[in-house]
Image (cartoon, grey):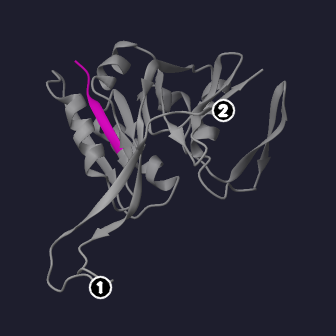
Amino acid sequence: MIDLAICIASRGLVHSRTMESVLDNIKGLSFPCKFFFTHDLPIPDAQNKLVQDALDWGADYLWFVEEDMLIPPDTFLKMIQMGKQIVAVDYPVGEKRYSCIAKKKDEILWCGLGCTLIRQEVFEIIPSPWFETDKTVRITNEDPFEYVIDKDIPYKYGGHDILFGIKTREKGVEITQLEGITAGHIKPAPVKKDYEPGSQSKKEGSNKGNYEFEIWNEIKNFQNYN
Protein backbone atom coordinates (compact mmCIF):
# COMPACT_ATOMS: atom_id res chain seq x y z
CA MET A 1 0.00 0.00 0.00
CA ILE A 2 1.33 3.43 -0.93
CA ASP A 3 0.13 6.98 -0.32
CA LEU A 4 0.09 9.17 -3.42
CA ALA A 5 0.27 12.97 -3.32
CA ILE A 6 -0.92 14.68 -6.50
CA CYS A 7 0.89 18.02 -6.54
CA ILE A 8 -0.53 20.83 -8.67
CA ALA A 9 1.25 24.17 -8.43
CA SER A 10 -1.48 26.57 -9.49
CA ARG A 11 -0.97 30.28 -10.05
CA GLY A 12 -4.71 30.67 -9.59
CA LEU A 13 -6.20 28.65 -12.46
CA VAL A 14 -6.17 24.96 -13.40
CA HIS A 15 -7.51 23.79 -16.75
CA SER A 16 -10.64 21.66 -16.55
CA ARG A 17 -9.10 19.28 -19.10
CA THR A 18 -6.09 18.86 -16.80
CA MET A 19 -8.24 17.87 -13.86
CA GLU A 20 -10.39 15.57 -15.99
CA SER A 21 -7.31 13.76 -17.32
CA VAL A 22 -5.79 13.40 -13.84
CA LEU A 23 -9.03 12.06 -12.38
CA ASP A 24 -9.32 9.57 -15.24
CA ASN A 25 -5.76 8.40 -14.49
CA ILE A 26 -6.40 7.70 -10.81
CA LYS A 27 -9.84 6.15 -11.26
CA GLY A 28 -10.02 2.79 -9.55
CA LEU A 29 -6.72 3.05 -7.67
CA SER A 30 -6.55 0.74 -4.67
CA PHE A 31 -4.38 3.04 -2.55
CA PRO A 32 -4.93 6.43 -0.91
CA CYS A 33 -4.28 9.59 -2.90
CA LYS A 34 -4.67 13.24 -2.00
CA PHE A 35 -4.56 16.44 -4.04
CA PHE A 36 -2.25 19.26 -2.99
CA PHE A 37 -2.59 22.72 -4.54
CA THR A 38 -0.88 26.06 -4.14
CA HIS A 39 -2.41 29.49 -4.64
CA ASP A 40 -0.75 32.84 -5.28
CA LEU A 41 2.79 31.55 -4.82
CA PRO A 42 5.59 32.11 -7.34
CA ILE A 43 8.14 29.62 -8.63
CA PRO A 44 9.88 27.97 -6.75
CA ASP A 45 7.96 28.68 -3.53
CA ALA A 46 4.91 26.86 -4.87
CA GLN A 47 6.85 23.69 -5.68
CA ASN A 48 8.68 23.68 -2.34
CA LYS A 49 5.42 24.12 -0.44
CA LEU A 50 3.85 21.22 -2.31
CA VAL A 51 6.74 18.96 -1.37
CA GLN A 52 6.63 19.96 2.29
CA ASP A 53 2.85 19.55 2.51
CA ALA A 54 2.99 16.17 0.80
CA LEU A 55 5.80 14.92 3.06
CA ASP A 56 3.97 16.14 6.15
CA TRP A 57 0.95 14.12 5.01
CA GLY A 58 3.13 11.01 4.66
CA ALA A 59 3.28 10.62 0.89
CA ASP A 60 5.30 7.77 -0.57
CA TYR A 61 5.12 9.18 -4.10
CA LEU A 62 4.62 12.75 -5.31
CA TRP A 63 3.06 13.11 -8.76
CA PHE A 64 3.71 16.59 -10.12
CA VAL A 65 1.18 17.74 -12.70
CA GLU A 66 1.31 21.29 -13.99
CA GLU A 67 -1.90 23.27 -14.39
CA ASP A 68 -1.91 23.15 -18.20
CA MET A 69 -1.15 19.48 -18.87
CA LEU A 70 -3.31 16.90 -20.63
CA ILE A 71 -2.35 13.48 -19.28
CA PRO A 72 -3.01 10.54 -21.65
CA PRO A 73 -5.06 7.59 -20.28
CA ASP A 74 -3.21 5.02 -18.15
CA THR A 75 -0.11 7.21 -17.92
CA PHE A 76 0.07 7.18 -14.13
CA LEU A 77 -0.21 3.39 -13.86
CA LYS A 78 2.61 2.98 -16.36
CA MET A 79 4.74 5.44 -14.39
CA ILE A 80 4.20 3.78 -11.01
CA GLN A 81 4.78 0.31 -12.47
CA MET A 82 8.30 1.35 -13.50
CA GLY A 83 9.27 1.44 -9.80
CA LYS A 84 11.89 4.15 -10.33
CA GLN A 85 12.88 7.08 -8.15
CA ILE A 86 11.97 9.67 -10.79
CA VAL A 87 9.80 9.01 -13.85
CA ALA A 88 9.20 11.82 -16.33
CA VAL A 89 6.74 12.10 -19.22
CA ASP A 90 7.82 14.26 -22.14
CA TYR A 91 5.75 17.13 -23.55
CA PRO A 92 6.31 20.04 -25.97
CA VAL A 93 7.42 23.42 -24.62
CA GLY A 94 7.48 26.80 -26.37
CA GLU A 95 6.54 27.86 -29.88
CA LYS A 96 9.19 25.55 -31.37
CA ARG A 97 7.71 22.58 -29.43
CA TYR A 98 10.94 21.56 -27.69
CA SER A 99 11.14 18.39 -25.63
CA CYS A 100 11.14 19.10 -21.89
CA ILE A 101 13.72 16.35 -21.36
CA ALA A 102 17.41 17.05 -21.94
CA LYS A 103 19.72 14.10 -22.59
CA LYS A 104 23.46 13.59 -22.99
CA LYS A 105 24.38 10.26 -24.58
CA ASP A 106 20.98 8.85 -23.55
CA GLU A 107 21.40 9.90 -19.90
CA ILE A 108 18.70 12.32 -18.78
CA LEU A 109 20.21 15.53 -17.42
CA TRP A 110 16.96 17.18 -16.37
CA CYS A 111 13.25 17.19 -17.13
CA GLY A 112 10.21 19.38 -16.79
CA LEU A 113 7.74 18.89 -13.95
CA GLY A 114 4.64 18.87 -16.13
CA CYS A 115 4.04 15.17 -15.51
CA THR A 116 6.70 13.73 -13.22
CA LEU A 117 6.48 11.05 -10.53
CA ILE A 118 9.02 11.27 -7.69
CA ARG A 119 9.50 8.91 -4.77
CA GLN A 120 9.52 10.41 -1.29
CA GLU A 121 13.07 9.29 -0.58
CA VAL A 122 14.43 11.64 -3.26
CA PHE A 123 13.43 14.60 -1.09
CA GLU A 124 15.47 13.13 1.74
CA ILE A 125 18.50 12.60 -0.49
CA ILE A 126 18.21 16.15 -1.88
CA PRO A 127 18.30 18.77 0.90
CA SER A 128 15.76 21.56 1.16
CA PRO A 129 15.16 23.89 -0.59
CA TRP A 130 14.55 21.30 -3.26
CA PHE A 131 13.73 23.79 -5.99
CA GLU A 132 15.74 26.95 -6.60
CA THR A 133 15.85 29.82 -9.10
CA ASP A 134 18.73 31.93 -7.76
CA LYS A 135 21.20 30.35 -10.20
CA THR A 136 21.39 30.04 -13.95
CA VAL A 137 22.59 27.12 -16.04
CA ARG A 138 24.60 28.51 -18.94
CA ILE A 139 25.38 26.19 -21.84
CA THR A 140 29.00 26.70 -22.91
CA ASN A 141 29.23 24.05 -25.61
CA GLU A 142 26.72 21.87 -27.44
CA ASP A 143 29.05 19.24 -28.94
CA PRO A 144 30.20 17.84 -26.63
CA PHE A 145 27.52 19.23 -24.33
CA GLU A 146 28.90 21.27 -21.45
CA TYR A 147 27.42 23.82 -19.08
CA VAL A 148 28.29 25.89 -16.03
CA ILE A 149 26.14 27.14 -13.16
CA ASP A 150 26.30 30.88 -12.63
CA LYS A 151 25.52 31.57 -8.99
CA ASP A 152 23.58 34.63 -7.85
CA ILE A 153 22.25 35.11 -11.38
CA PRO A 154 18.58 34.15 -11.20
CA TYR A 155 16.59 32.65 -14.01
CA LYS A 156 14.33 35.14 -15.72
CA TYR A 157 11.72 32.37 -15.98
CA GLY A 158 11.65 28.96 -14.33
CA GLY A 159 14.81 26.91 -14.25
CA HIS A 160 13.86 25.23 -10.98
CA ASP A 161 13.36 21.93 -12.78
CA ILE A 162 16.75 22.13 -14.51
CA LEU A 163 18.58 22.83 -11.26
CA PHE A 164 16.65 20.06 -9.51
CA GLY A 165 17.70 17.61 -12.23
CA ILE A 166 21.33 18.58 -11.83
CA LYS A 167 21.15 18.09 -8.06
CA THR A 168 19.57 14.66 -8.38
CA ARG A 169 22.30 13.46 -10.72
CA GLU A 170 24.97 14.79 -8.37
CA LYS A 171 23.42 12.65 -5.61
CA GLY A 172 23.25 9.55 -7.79
CA VAL A 173 19.48 9.69 -8.37
CA GLU A 174 18.54 8.60 -11.88
CA ILE A 175 15.84 10.33 -13.91
CA THR A 176 13.97 7.89 -16.15
CA GLN A 177 11.48 8.49 -18.93
CA LEU A 178 8.20 6.78 -19.66
CA GLU A 179 8.85 6.00 -23.30
CA GLY A 180 6.14 6.13 -25.93
CA ILE A 181 3.96 8.67 -24.10
CA THR A 182 3.72 12.40 -24.83
CA ALA A 183 1.56 14.57 -22.59
CA GLY A 184 -0.43 17.40 -24.11
CA HIS A 185 0.32 21.04 -23.36
CA ILE A 186 -2.87 23.13 -23.25
CA LYS A 187 -2.48 26.58 -24.75
CA PRO A 188 -5.24 29.23 -24.55
CA ALA A 189 -6.72 31.15 -27.44
CA PRO A 190 -8.80 34.37 -27.30
CA VAL A 191 -12.28 34.25 -25.78
CA LYS A 192 -14.98 33.38 -28.28
CA LYS A 193 -17.78 35.95 -28.09
CA ASP A 194 -21.37 36.12 -29.26
CA TYR A 195 -21.59 39.09 -31.68
CA GLU A 196 -24.56 40.86 -33.22
CA PRO A 197 -24.53 40.51 -37.04
CA GLY A 198 -22.50 43.38 -38.49
CA SER A 199 -21.45 44.58 -35.05
CA GLN A 200 -18.26 44.26 -33.03
CA SER A 201 -20.18 44.44 -29.75
CA LYS A 202 -21.08 41.47 -27.61
CA LYS A 203 -24.81 41.02 -27.14
CA GLU A 204 -26.01 42.66 -23.97
CA GLY A 205 -27.02 40.14 -21.34
CA SER A 206 -25.77 37.14 -23.31
CA ASN A 207 -24.28 34.18 -21.44
CA LYS A 208 -22.68 32.79 -24.56
CA GLY A 209 -18.93 32.88 -24.63
CA ASN A 210 -16.27 30.24 -24.06
CA TYR A 211 -12.52 29.87 -24.07
CA GLU A 212 -10.80 28.14 -26.92
CA PHE A 213 -7.66 26.05 -26.55
CA GLU A 214 -5.24 24.19 -28.73
CA ILE A 215 -3.49 21.08 -27.48
CA TRP A 216 0.18 20.77 -28.28
CA ASN A 217 0.94 17.05 -28.26
CA GLU A 218 3.76 16.78 -30.78
CA ILE A 219 7.43 17.34 -29.98
CA LYS A 220 9.27 18.85 -32.94
CA ASN A 221 12.71 19.50 -31.43
CA PHE A 222 14.63 17.23 -29.06
CA GLN A 223 17.35 18.17 -26.58
CA ASN A 224 19.64 15.25 -27.30
CA TYR A 225 23.33 16.13 -26.90
CA ASN A 226 26.63 14.29 -27.26
Q: Dividing the picture into quarters, in which one does residue 20 lie?
A: top left
Q: Residues within 10 Å of mark 2 (few under 14, many from 20)?
A: some
Residue 123 percent coordinates (x, y)? 48, 32
How many marks do you count on the picture?
2
Q: Is residue 202 magenta?
A: no
Residue 61 percent coordinates (x, y)? 35, 28
What residue sits 18% from the left and 23% below the top? 31
Residue 83 vertical placement versus 13 (above, below): above
Mark 2 residue element: helix
- The amino acid sitting under disc 1 is Ser
Q: Nearer the viewer, mark 1 or mark 2?
A: 1
What residue sits 37% from the left and 33% below the top? 62
Residue 107 percent coordinates (x, y)? 65, 18
What residue sits 40% from the left and 64% below the top? 40
Q: Which residue is mark 1?
A: 201
Residue 118 percent coordinates (x, y)? 43, 28
Mark 1 residue element: loop
Q: Separation of disc 1 and disc 2 at Cα? A: 52 Å
What residue sits 32% from the left and 54% below the top? 14
| Residue at the farthest top position | 82
Q: Dividing the picture into quarters, in which one does residue 35 lie?
A: top left
Q: Can residue 170 be seen here? A: yes
Q: Which residue is mark 2?
A: 166
Magenta residues, as a range? Answer: 1-7
Q: Is residue 2 magenta?
A: yes
- The amino acid sitting under disc 2 is Ile
